[in-house]
Image: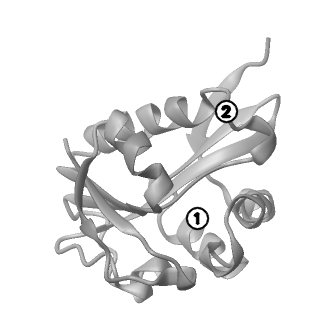
């Protein structure tokens, strides 16, 4: 059986994380390599990787804000990010497609939630597509509203978890 390791992202992970991101997300909804590199460099504490057998298989990354505006595209480059802010904003929840459907995403999300609690965050915000709303509800997120964002030319929904 493989050993799972949850750890903070490192700059050496940029290419692997980008490869997972572009394989798992459709078209323009995937973050660019540069955005992933910026997120790791500026806020590795909010970039949680899941590794098995020495290979990153998934990750969640976030920034923090005092006032959350989910449709703020600049925030995806951590413009306006403040690590001391009490609200975490998830930008990617992604798992290598070869590892999907095996419970790894749930393990990763639970670990991320615990990490945010330890960092004294009060809320976690995210946007997801319609087909993922029920999954996030199972993890304890509340549905807020359809998002004003049309990131990647798609419809999104805003979700919130109070910690």
Q: Check residue 40 in the rendering and tell me which mark sits there, or answer none.
A: 1
Placement of 126 over or under 34, stated as above or below: above
Q: Are marks 1 and 2 in contact (CB under 8 Å)?
A: no
The mark nearer the N terminus, 1 or 2, is: 1
Tag 1's secondary structure?
Answer: helix
Q: Tell me the element at label 2.
A: loop
Q: Which mark is residue 152?
A: none
Name the residue at 57% across, 69% down: 41
Corner quadrant of residue 40: bottom right
Which numbered disc, 1 or 2, marks the residue closer to the eye? 2
Which residue is labeled 2 in the image?
101
**Which residue is rendered at x = 57% and y = 82% of the image?**
152
In this rendered view, identify the residue nearer to me: 56 or 94.
94
Q: Residue furthest front?
A: 131
Quadrant assignment for the C terminus = top left
**Residue 50 place in picture, x, y as percent:** 64, 38
**Quadrant hosting residue 141:** top left
């Amino acid at each position: 059986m493989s050993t799972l390791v949850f750890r903070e992202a490192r700059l050496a992970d940029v290419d692997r994380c980008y490869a997972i991101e572009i394989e798992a997300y459709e078209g323009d909804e995937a973050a660019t390599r540069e955005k992933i590199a910026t997120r790791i460099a500026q806020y590795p504490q909010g970039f949680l990787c899941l590794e098995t057998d020495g290979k990153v298989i998934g990750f969640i990354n976030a920034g923090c804000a005092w006032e959350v505006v989910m449709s703020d595209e600049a925030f995806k480059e951590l413009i306006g990010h403040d690590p001391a802010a009490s609200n975490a904003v998830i930008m990617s929840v992604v798992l290598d497609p070869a590892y999907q459907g095996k419970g790894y995403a749930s393990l990763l999300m639970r670990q991320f939630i615990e990490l945010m609690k330890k960092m004294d965050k009060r809320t976690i915000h995210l946007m997801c597509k319609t087909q993922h709303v029920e999954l996030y509800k199972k993890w304890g997120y509340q549905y807020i509203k359809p998002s004003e964002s049309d990131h990647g030319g798609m419809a999104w929904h805003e979700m919130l978890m109070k910690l």
